[in-house]
Image (cartoon, rainbow, N blue to C red):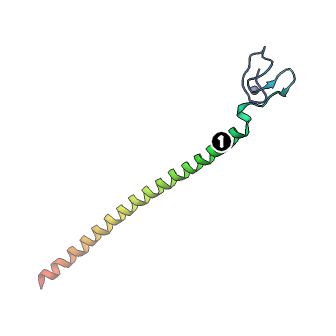
Amino acid sequence: MQCPSCQLENPPTAEVCDCGYSFTKRVQTRRTAADSPEVLELRAIARSVKSIRTMALFWTCVMIVSAILAAIQFNQIEERLKDVQKQFVPTELRK
Ligand SMILES: [Zn+2]
């Protein structure tokens, strides 16, 4: 049978689930380590660290993409500059 508290599948003979839920009394008989304030606090910290990590990863990607785009644009400008210079060289040679 499945525990209504933690959804863990228990053998039909089980009277109390690992989480402390009593199948006979239909109540949570004891708090587990997973419910302790320390664990809940650590879980909250872990969640925020995870979101910071995701944000950092996202912005790193944005910066890399921006750097690549800037490099491409720089190359295009340099190419155009060379073309413009080529156009000017012949006229200078004519003089
Ligand atoms: Zn349970």
Say few, some or many: other residues with alpha carbon within 10 Å of mark 1 (under 14 / 14 to 19 / 20 or more).
few
Q: Compared to 85, does 76 lie above or below?
A: above
Q: Name the residue under label 1.
A: 42
Residue at 67% from the left image edge and 45% from the top image edge: 44
Q: How many labels does the image show?
A: 1
- Image location of residue 7, percent across then percent down: 74, 28
* Residue farthest to the front, as pictured: 38
For this view, does 54 lie left or right of residue 4? left
- Image location of residue 70, percent across then percent down: 38, 63
Q: Compared to 45, does 22 lie above or below?
A: above
Quadrant placement of the N terminus? top right
* Residue farthest to the top, as pictured: 13
| Mark 1: amino acid | Leu
- Image location of residue 79, percent across then percent down: 28, 67
For this view, does 40 lie left or right of residue 71? right
The kind of secondary structure element at disc 1 is helix
Displayed quadrant of residue 46: top right
